[in-house]
Image (spheres, rainbow, N blue to C red):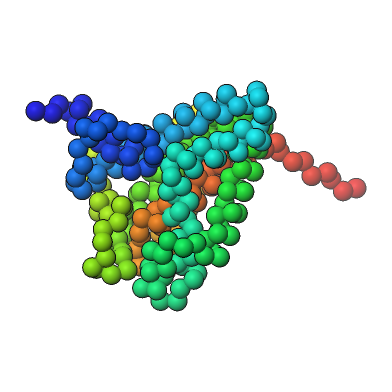
Amino acid sequence: MPTWLSTQLNLFWLALSFFTRLPVPNSVQYSAAKMHTAGRYFSLVGWLLAFILLAVYTLCLPLFGIHVSVVVLLMLNLLLTGALHQDGLADTFDGFYGGQQQQQKLHIMKDSRLGTYGSCTLFITLLLQFALLAALAERQLLCNALFIAYPLSRAMALSHVQHLGYVKAQQSDKSSKSEPLASPLSQTSLTCLLVFAALGLICLPLSQAIIVVVCCSLLRVLIARWFVKHIGGYTGDTLGCAQQFQELLIYALLLAMAAPTVLIPSIG
């Protein structure tokens, strides 16, 4: 009979297999219900990714300097996650702005080909991530940035399943990878998700932590309205897009709060 600990470990392995290309034990038991419950550990997977990326960055830094090390960090992130969120980001922009009607947008999002909207968005996003991470690293804030952004952005993205409906192009379409998550999390799972996500905020002064939470919550509202406007709910791709937006916002906030105050000289 499985113990509570073995059950939770199995859920963590499922979460890890969903979000990354990292190997998991062959003994992991899968079901749609288990995968849905595994959502509670998605932010914990963010912590693990942040640890791995920071370790590699630390090894590369004395050899290559900040900018090359940040590029290595970004490359490794894409390899570890299989570009899961970036794929969702590109598909979302291709669908939202390449189609006219809801069903047309959803069909475009299912297309494996990359369009102009998606490729341009992906390029700008990666460029902005590099610029923000390099600037944070120069201020010795990269550690805080990764440990805050990776768990929190994943939790904020998954939180959309609590209030939005899952949509797909046709009811007869085959189930997608994210469909087991397409219902609200239980109160226990939601609490675990948010607690693990919020742990990184203890690195910040209370006032800055509040600013991050408020801004991320406001962005979540705007993103939800954007999703509803275009397709009436969310898909797995849009959740990946939401994660990327939240990650960029957190980096930008941390950098802005770390920037020295600019004194405007008086006239006369």
| Residue 104 horizontal side relative to residue 129, left or right | left
Residue 205 x, y percent position in the rendering: 53, 31
Figure check: 119 above or below 97: above
Q: In which quarter of the image is the N terminus?
A: top left
Q: Answer yes or no: is residue 75 visible.
A: yes
Residue shown at 57%/32% (left/top)? 142
Residue shown at 63%/26% (left/top)? 61
- Quarter-wise, where is residue 265 in the image? top right
Residue shown at 48%/65% (left/top)? 94
Which of the pair 268/20 is nearer the observer? Answer: 20
- Quarter-wise, where is residue 18 in the image? top left
Q: Answer yes or no: is residue 194 visible.
A: no
Figure check: 191 above or below 166: above
Residue 106 x, y percent position in the rendering: 38, 68
Residue 34 x, y percent position in the rendering: 20, 42
| Residue 209 horizontal side relative to residue 167, left or right | right
